[in-house]
């Protein structure tokens, strides 16, 4: 009986450890966005910290917000895709990502709402922050940058996408 209880607890603990999938996982479908991000100051935010600051939870709370949620075997450094868009474990499947509304239901968050956590009033950032200007500087997925194949994605209702996702429909 104890063995069965232990067997049931171990997998659930492993899945609860993190909702992060990592930026490399995002690259699979969003190669152009990943490339732009990987050359950005966000991807290298920990580079601006001293060795002492890299140990400070206060500094890491903005310069590497996902680091504490990543696994010890695969730590997340810098400000990753999921820092801005939320942990992707639930919204990552292609069937979910094909529909913006459905992806939001599964946890995809709007990046602009997360900016102020590090750049807003009361943050340690010395510069004033204007979200619209800042989003223009870090643009990695506007209509001008979207590959044509992405513009031609099929239009489906969220109910069909959820049903397809649950049934394991091909990506």
Image (cartoon, rainbow, N blue to C red):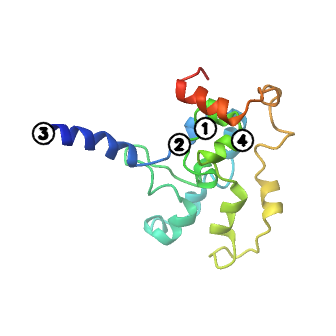
**Count of marks placed on residues:** 4
Task: Kindly report the distance in space between the C-alpha atoms of the residues bearing marks 2 and 3.
Answer: 37 Å
In x, y percent, where is residue 165? 57, 29
The residue that appears at 14% across and 38% down in the rendered structure is 3
Q: In the rendered view, does 67 fall on the left or right side of 128?
A: left
Residue that label 1 marks: 26
Q: CA distance from mark 4 to mark 2?
A: 20 Å
**Residue 159 seen from this side:** yes
Placement of 104 over or under 154, stated as above or below? below
> Which numbered tag is attached to residue 1?
3
Say which of 62 and 3 sits in front: 3
- Label 3 vs 4, first from the N-terminus: 3
Which tag, 4 or 2, sits closer to the chain's start? 2
Which residue position holds label 4? 100
Front: mark 4 or 2: 4
Which residue sits at x=71%, y=37%?
Answer: 99
Q: Quadrant of residue 143?
A: top right
The residue mark sitting in front, 4 or 1, is 4
Residues at discs 4 and 2 in contact (Cβ within 8 Å): no
Q: Secondary structure at mark 2?
A: loop
Q: Are marks 2 and 1 in contact (CB under 8 Å)?
A: yes
């Amino acid at each position: 009986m104890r063995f069965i209880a232990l067997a049931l607890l171990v997998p659930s603990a492993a899945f609860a450890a993190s909702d992060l999938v990592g930026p490399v996982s995002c690259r699979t479908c969003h190669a152009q966005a990943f490339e732009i991000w990987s050359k950005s100051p966000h991807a290298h935010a920990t580079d601006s910290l001293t060795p002492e600051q890299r140990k400070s939870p206060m500094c890491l709370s903005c310069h590497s917000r996902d680091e504490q949620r990543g696994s010890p075997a695969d730590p997340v450094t810098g400000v990753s895709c999921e820092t801005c868009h939320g942990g992707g474990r639930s919204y990552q499947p292609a069937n979910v990502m094909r529909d913006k509304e459905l992806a939001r239901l599964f946890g995809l968050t709007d990046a602009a709402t997360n900016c102020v956590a590090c750049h807003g009033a009361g943050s340690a950032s010395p510069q004033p922050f204007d979200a619209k200007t800042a989003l223009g500087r870090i643009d990695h997925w506007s209509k001008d940058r979207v590959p044509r194949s992405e513009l031609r994605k099929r239009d489906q209702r969220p109910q069909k996408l959820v049903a397809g996702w649950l049934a394991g429909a091909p990506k």
